[in-house]
Amino acid sequence: MADDLTTEATGLLQDLIRNACVNDGTVTSGEEVRNADLIAGYLGYGGFDVETFEPQPKRRSVLARIEGSDPTAPTLMLMGHTDVVPVNVDGWSRDPFAAELDDGMIWGRGAVDMLNLTSTMAVAFRHLVQSGFKPKGTLLYLAVADEEALGTWGAKYLVENELDHVHADYVVTESGGYQVPTQAGTRLPIMVEEKGTFWSNITVHGTPSHASQAYRTDNALVTAAEVVRRIAEYRPDARIGDTWRRYVEGLGLPVEMADPDRLDELIADLPLGLSRIAHSCTHTTMAPTVAHGGTKTNIIPDRVDLQVDVRTMPGQSGTAARELLIEAIGDDLMHKVEITSNDDPATASPIDTPLWDSLTRVTGRLCEGSALVPTIMTGGTDNRFFRRAGAVGYGFGLFSRRIRFEDYAKMFHGHDERVDEESLDLSTQLWLALAEDLLG
Ligand SMILES: [Zn+2]
């Protein structure tokens, strides 16, 4: 059985990759209708009913449901996105949209983010339908458009406008589940928390004058350079939450990693990748990313617009984030700047839940001697919309040992994205076992 399902998951993943639903953030990109129709056709085999939603032309999402027999039993949603981010072909050693299968490895954009899970969830769901699965709780499968550009035409739209269709008590989507070997056994990170975004625009003001007389001018570009320097050098205090503490414990990392007084010193000496992750999981981060300003070489500029990608910690309000930004810029420059921000706070789910217990049982069988370790997503996923609507939302899947964490992290939005068939098999088995265990 497993082999047949893996062949199906591989074929479906290849077709999803080849459809190249590339979301560049513009409203006309993505065209997820192609992947949505592929999935609707796959699930609708034999006359099974699926629903579709299309709030914008070609931005289609697909929902399928196995209704539970007990209205008081919980609803589990398996959710995958169908869009992918753009590629830079020059960095790839294979055609990113050919979905080549070589030595058990499928290559292509979306292979780990996250068409692999979108595919295996669909394969598990169809198998459950065909085998006459009659659970007490309801099982939903949702393939959404537009995850890669804030979920506007996908998860966000559906939660805001179609909640009676997509309501779920438990949601599983990306990302996690790579195997981390430790002395105590294999550890499987599971995302239970996502940082917030507090994207800010900083307008820096100056006074225009002739640039041939540069002495003692009020140059907005020079002020902006100082603002950028101060933000880049600002070091907010470490904030150690429960999730990070459990992560450090679970992976057997040095205890100092969970000590707010010693963490910063330790982080500075870690290998680059780990250093960035450890810092982001324990601090508010501020990255100046865009600057626009100046009009002409011989005019002292009177306005520069800066964009800063601020990422907030769980429990941190927009007001608190703004105060940090003001502290970074400094009182002496604040009279020259205006800050406007868009607050999308962090979200988190507890771990003392039936979904956690169920995943623990199921993964214990699939990866012997393994244990789940809660972790923090420094970026955002569609889980945030469902958590805010009351669901427990985790990011998870399963990967074989061929996909090491270092490679996994690099492949996200990177070059040479690829996944092996054994990972597809493990994930398919995971969804089947989870549905049985949680929904009964
Ligand atoms: Zn993704």
Image (spheres, rainbow, N blue to C red):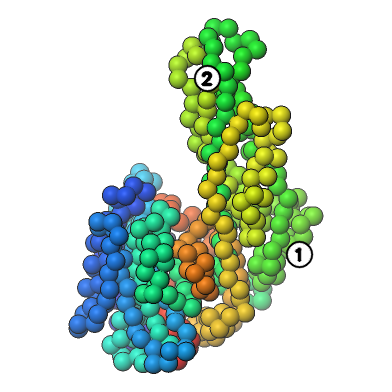
Quadrant for ligand 1? bottom left
At a point 65% along the width and 12% down the height, the residue shown is 216
Residue 262's quadrant in the figure?
A: bottom right
Q: Position of residue 362 (x, y in %)?
A: 51, 84
Residue extending farthest to the right is 261
114 over 215 or under it: above or below: below
Provide the residue designation for mark 1.
255
> Disc 2 to disc 1, how far (Cα)?
50 Å
Secondary element at tag 2: loop
Q: In which quarter of the image is the N terminus?
A: bottom left
Q: Where is residue 208 in the image (x, y as percent from the top left)?
A: 53, 16
Q: Which amino acid does label 2 sit on?
A: Pro
At a point 70% along the width and 40% down the height, the residue shown is 327
| Relative depth, front residue between 157 and 30 | 157
| Relative depth, front residue between 43 and 26 | 26
At a point 35% along the width and 58% down the height, the residue shown is 153
Q: Which amino acid does label 1 sit on?
A: Val
At a point 61% along the width and 14% down the height, the residue shown is 217
